[in-house]
Image (cartoon, rainbow, N blue to C red):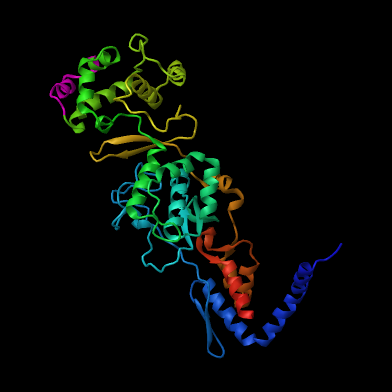
Amino acid sequence: MAITSDVAVRLVIGLMWPVVVFALAVLYRRGLSAFLEGAAGLIRGGLSKVSLPGGFAFELAKTTEFKVDWSGPGGEDLRNSVAIGQFASGVQDILGLLKPPQPSQSADYAVFDLGSGDKWLTSRLHLFSLLLRRTHGLRYCAFVYEVSDAPGRWLGFATTEGVRWSLALKYPHLEQAAAYGLTDFRVSSRTGALDPQVATSFITNYLKLIQINPLLSTGDFANDVKGFAKYLLEGSGLSAFLRSQLPETALSELKAGPQWDYQLAGVVAALNALIEKQSLYDEARFTGIQLSDETRRFVDLKPEGDERILLNRFLLHEACPQFFLPVLPLTVTSFNNKEWVKLRTPDASGIARTTWECARWLDRASAERLLGSQLGYAQVQMASLQAISRKDQMSMILRAEGAMVALVGDSGRFERLVDRMALAARAIEFYL
């Protein structure tokens, strides 16, 4: 087999490299000692600069954890609450939690605590891996979980891009929500950061496309309050049935000539009570109304609970689309297919409202299945590092696999990430 000149050059370099490294190590053994001393300090989280004989010094590659406050002012958890419209605690806008304390702070990794499987929704991991990458160029997601009485146990790491696209591959609707949610494409950094106002709108639109609140709200009729009141007071068929089920207080609201949607609070509460307790379908009520095949199949199933509410919303929209808005996402047919999570969060009045989100809870097992080969597991025990020399500490880190290496303490508790590739690059720069 013929050997090309390029292959020959690489072969020579490969054969000569160990000899060169050994010669440089002998020649600069004092400097090498200082380098290893500094690298060991970096691994332990201390030093970030190495000073060598002759007054020469250089910076080591130190990783920084990007700490995020996931809690909002009302105690809601942004990783799994119904809405992310409120400001996070101690910040001025919705994306304040995604901004570093100092503009110069690096964003090497952030810790994503899966707990025992009740903290992160797949949708929120997709959303925040996307936003943290864009707003501050976050490189890695470090995943930990909880088992027994040992929280913060190391699971693995993945790039933010790897997390996003793994989720998009499994759940295409999340990437669709991201595409439709962004209506303003102006960016404010070279990583694609969004203006806070644009980002807030993006988050709201994103969630709107993957959530369903099966009950009606007064805002559903804000576009034509007068028309809706007239429809309920004077209509026939389904309208007449709805009118017959309204209490006198709700009828009084309609007869008072409402001008604004908030004046329909009693009417909406009465309609919600109705669609919660029974199916609206009756052949006589829907005479002349063309129902979709999907809705007819849903009727035949005779659903209960939230499924029945969902059916009633379909029936209301198809019977009177000018007043009853469609249920989004439009493709939803059931909440019982394990692709929906039921969330309950108190609204401004303190009443718990149910929202279904097209997502799943993440635990250790599901995260491993989802991320697959994107998940790196490299780790070094802190106790093992402390028991060996500084030179061997450096060697232990460099012998590990992957771009990053986790330092873990007792019970596998995650301490910090070390950038193995950057550390190796600094070592090569030193020799050269």
Q: Nearer the viewer, residue 248 or 227?
A: 227
Is-magenta flag for residue 187?
Answer: no
Residue 174 is at least partly visible in this image: yes
Residue 389 is at least partly visible in this image: no
Vertical arrangement, residue 366 with respect to residue 93, above or below: above
Which residues fall within the magenta stretch? 244-258
Q: Main secondary structure of the magenta part?
A: helix
Residue sitting farthest toward the top: 284
Residue 282 is situated, as x and y percent measured from the top left of the image, at 36, 12
Residue 26 is situated, as x and y percent measured from the top left of the image, at 69, 85
The C terminus: image quadrant: bottom right
Q: Residue visible at 43% across and 62% down?
A: 66
Residue 125 is situated, as x and y percent measured from the top left of the image, at 46, 48
Q: Residue visible at 40% across and 46% down?
A: 182
Residue sitting farthest toward the bottom: 54
Q: Quadrant of residue 393?
A: bottom right
Q: In the rendered view, does 297 fall on the left or right side of 212?
A: right
